[in-house]
Image: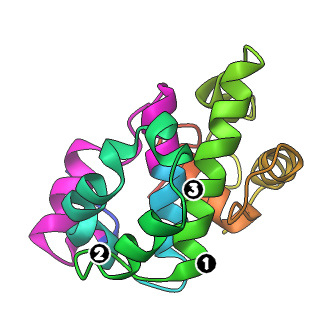
Amino acid sequence: MERPAWALSSPLMQEYYDTEWGLPVRDTRGVYERITLEGFQSGLSWATVLRKRPAFRAAFDGFDPDAVARYGDAEVERLLADAGIVRNRRKIEAAITNARATVALTERGEDLAELVWSFRPDDPTAGTDLTHSPESLACSKELKRRGFVFVGPVTMFALMQAIGILEHRL
């Protein structure tokens, strides 16, 4: 199997590429988890976040948006003290804000995964050698309009590739 250079950097990254990256994620919890992790990755290597993923899952109630949406100050302080995750207050608060925005979508009869997937381009391989696309920019704007944070166009581009919306070409 031909892999991009980043997927060859470690066994963990190769396993992620071979078994998960680019495969469709179409459930709300899965998309919320990926948005959260992409936000935490900002400014860091993906390998760092991937190594900490089990701790993130434990710390954030398995990325259950309903549970995370109920977090308050005590949970923020608990997360800031958790050495197993990335301890950045703004990113932790963004995860909570985004859980609340996800719950708000659900309460309006909408689905986060369907919303994000609605930005799939007609040609999912177009422009995938860039860091953003018109679709990732539009997705970012729409999520921000709906109360999400830490969802810039570059972050959404990475998300869209990771969950199979955009197809990567080697």
Residue that badge 2 annotates: 47
Q: Residue at x 43, y 64 (%)?
A: 75
Instruction: Name the one closer to the observer, 38 or 3.
Output: 38
Horizontal side of residue 149 vs 138, given as left or right: left
Look at label 1 and name its amino acid: Arg
Residue that badge 1 annotates: 90
Residue 82 lies in the magenta stretch = no
Look at label 3 and name its amino acid: Ile
Instruction: Name the one closer to the observer, 143 or 25.
Output: 143
Q: Residue at x 35, y 72 (%)?
A: 78
Horizontal side of residue 88 vs 9, given as left or right: right
Determine whether 132 is above or below 67 in the image.
below
Residue 52 x/y as whole percent: 24, 70
Q: Are marks 2 and 3 in contact (CB under 8 Å)?
A: no
Q: Residue at x 31, y 43 (%)?
A: 62
**Which portion, as a residue range, is magenta?**
7-33
Q: SS for tag 1?
A: helix
Q: Which residue in the rendered view is the most extreme toward the left?
A: 11
* The C terminus - image quarter: bottom left
**Mark on residue 1?**
none
**Mark on residue 96?**
3
Instruction: Name the one closer to the observer, 13 or 84.
Output: 84
Determine whether 114 is above or below 64 in the image.
above
Q: Main secondary structure of the magenta part?
A: helix
Q: Residues within 10 Å of mark 2 (few under 14, many from 20)?
A: some
How far apart are the two marked residues, 1 and 3, measured between alpha carbons? 10 Å
Along the polypeptide, which appears first: circle 2 or circle 1?
Answer: 2
Look at label 2 and name its amino acid: Ala
Residue 103 x/y as whole percent: 63, 32
Q: Residue at x 45, y 67 (%)?
A: 74
